[in-house]
Amino acid sequence: MDERDVTLLKAISDLETGSPEKLHEETDIPVSTIHYRLNNLREAGVIENDLYDIDLEEFGLGVTVVVEVFADYTGSYRDFGEKILDIEGVTQAYFTMGETDFIVVAHLTGREMVERLIGDFERIEEVDRTNSTFVISTLRDSHRVLQSYSLDTLVDELAED
Amino acid sequence: MDERDVTLLKAISDLETGSPEKLHEETDIPVSTIHYRLNNLREAGVIENDLYDIDLEEFGLGVTVVVEVFADYTGSYRDFGEKILDIEGVTQAYFTMGETDFIVVAHLTGREMVERLIGDFERIEEVDRTNSTFVISTLRDSHRVLQSYSLDTLVDELAED
DNA sequence: TGTGAAATTCAATGGGT
DNA sequence: ACCCATTGAATTTCACA
């Protein structure tokens, strides 16, 4: 995986499309090369399916960390939340009830990057304390939430009429 | 959103494709109707983009819960993990270091379903204790992990050659 | 609102550089 | 890795149930 592959995958994420034409406009990579590259990335297992879901392990973001953030901020939690979302690698951020203020999930390249992440959190002035939990093994990280439901349950719960 | 819409969205998740032809094979919904339905779901904001990412709030799975699971099991964590993955609504499940054994994220329809979920956990014999945290507001739940990184960082960290 | 058939646009493929 | 020509699939349109 070289710079071009990374650029291509990043463009897919940003533009939220797999259209070769649009990816070409964004990246200046020729359309036929986009096909060529995407096929290779599929074969390598980086791109998992027709929906361009990415295998984070194969891509190189195989390290997952869950961080609980305890903070003392004035103003709305949304404004403070922006500071959390600015940290690179934060893929989920929840404002929660109970003991914790925020729960954050981050996907990273390695241990060095975990250190950087924790540092980024501690560097936010309103943050009192963080509690980081290292993920040893990801049993499931579903890109497709509906897979964890049976059709029957979904229909019962959500279908109108 | 009626039963047909739900069936269609579930088929997209299961087959991991947006191909009208394959969705037709799975659901028996005529191809032109699939287009018609998908357009409506796009307009309604249930389908967010070309990659068929789903807006869980719009779809009706707007309630998020984070559950820490403490368990006393014999054998491998993977075998035990299967029991966690069997619970409907579990979209992420991590086996972790530190105080917690497992951290689980679930997406649900409402408070009633939260009760069912907690019950499902408590019903697993090896589970000693659970600690559930209710999400008040989702600041980010990224379907596209790469969006939280700059291209520069990704290239620096992951590009070879 | 849903469906089928035809017309058009776009993506995928393969040979050649 | 790239371009071009061909094939094939997806999308749009519209007439009609």
Image: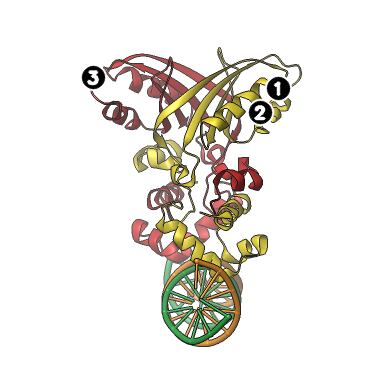
Chain colours: A red, B yellow, C orange, D green
Q: Residue under circle 3? A: A74
- The furthest residue to the left: A75
Q: Which mark is residue A132?
A: none
Answer with left or right where residue B83 lies relative to residue A60: right
Q: Residue under circle 1? A: B124
Residue at x-position 35% and y-position 40%:
B150
Give the distance between the C-alpha atoms of the residues marked 2 and 3, in whole angstroms. 38 Å
Tell me, yes or no, whether dots 1 and 2 are on the same chain.
yes
Element marked by disc 1: loop
Horizontal and vertical percent for residue B64?
Answer: 49, 32
Task: Residue type at mark 3: give it.
Answer: Thr
Residue at x-position 34% and y-position 57%:
A26
Disc 1 is attached to a residue of which chain? B
Disc 2 is attached to a residue of which chain? B
Count of numbered labels shown in the rendering: 3
Asked whether disc 1 touches disc 2, contact meaning CB atoms under 8 Å apart, the reply is yes
Task: Residue type at mark 1: give it.
Answer: Ile
Q: Nearer the viewer, residue B13 or A21?
A: B13
Asked whether disc 2 touches disc 3, contact meaning CB atoms under 8 Å apart, the reply is no
Residue at x-position 55% and y-position 42%:
A145
Q: Nearer the viewer, residue A44 or A81?
A: A81
Asked whether disc 1 touches disc 3, contact meaning CB atoms under 8 Å apart, the reply is no
Q: Is residue D6 above or below residue A148?
A: below
Q: Which mark is residue B84?
A: 2
Task: Residue type at mark 2: give it.
Answer: Ile
Element marked by disc 3: loop
